[in-house]
Amino acid sequence: MGKFTDALKKAAEARLSHIEKMDQQETQVKYEFVARKTVESNIDPRIMTFYDTKSPVTEQYRTLRTNLTALSSGSKPLKAVTITSSTHGEGKTISSINLAITMAQDLNSKSILLIDADMRRSKVNRYLGVPVSEGLSEILSGTADIEKGLLNIGIPNLTVMLAGKAPQNPAELLGSVKMKELINKLKARFDFIIIDAPPIVPVTDVGIFGRHTDGAIMVVQANRTQKGVIRHAQGLLQQAQIDLLGYILTDIRYHIPAYIYRYL
Ligand SMILES: Nc1ncnc2c1ncn2[C@@H]1O[C@H](COP(=O)(O)OP(=O)(O)OP(=O)(O)O)[C@@H](O)[C@H]1O
Ligand SMILES: [Mg+2]
């Protein structure tokens, strides 16, 4: 028993150090587009929509907001979207946060909820610069009520639900009836919900809860994700009966100077 526990512990440690190494590699190879900090905040400078409303990146998120709004119709309202990708590190979390902030900045002042449903590699709290606290995992496992998991981070119209403590069984929790009920309750309470989810190819989580949302957006990292992998991810979404609403392409390098994109 002792040996078995040790082996499990070692495997968990090895997995963690592997994830950390992958994170370092991602940070090393990627071109980081960061904002000049215009206000004092713990929010990561990669959350461009928070710091620079005039940047071309923010403008792209406004276009995404417009496109999403256009997809919503009276007979099929769009109230909850899952942000996923085929593999790790393609930009899901940064895209989810930027989209949530852009939706919250809408002049029609809607109430927006951002949920971190990536309980295996939760990073929303890090990018938002807020401490870890109770969230989705505690709500689904019944040790915290919904109110405890709804955070106000000082951005008007935006509420955040963190992932909570990494559970042993994320797939079981996310696939539970409680998850379906939670999404339905939150849909009745908020105008729009954005769910930062794990990637669909390596883990099963999105396949089991995605259909309780109104569709998925697939984040694709330019010049990295291979066509075959994207097709496989599309097939998995289809099998799971999740509508693929569209794509967000990240890590695009512009060869035209940024000032040409900027209308000041
Ligand atoms: N639009 C973008 N353009 C360029 N780089 C980006 C973009 N979005 C994110 N990145 C970079 O990609 C890396 C991973 O981003 P992020 O954490 O959002 O990915 P993820 O898909 O959520 O990863 P994980 O699968 O680990 O949850 C970060 O270093 C980030 O700066
Ligand atoms: Mg992420």
Image (cartoon, helix red, strand yellow):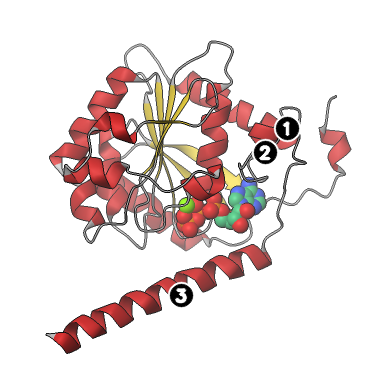
The correct choice, above or below, for 180 with respect to 107 in the image is below
Give the CA distance from mark 1 to mark 2: 6 Å
When asked about the image quadrant of residue 38, the answer is top right
Q: Position of residue 174 (x, y in %)?
A: 24, 47
The residue at the point 23 percent across, 61 percent down is 168
Instruction: Check disc 3 and report the residue beneath it.
Output: 18
The answer to whether the beta carbon of the residue marked 1 is less than 8 Å from any atom of ligand 1 is no
Instruction: Check disc 2 and report the residue beneath it.
Output: 48
Q: Amino acid at mark 1?
A: Asp
Task: Examine the rendering and report whether any part of residue 251 can be seen.
Answer: no
Q: Are marks 1 and 2 in contact (CB under 8 Å)?
A: yes
Residue 52 numbered mark, or none:
1
For residue 127, side relative to residue 191 (left or right): right
Between residues 208 and 27, which one lies in front from this camera angle?
A: 27
Q: Amino acid at mark 3?
A: His
The residue at the point 72 percent across, 47 percent down is 34
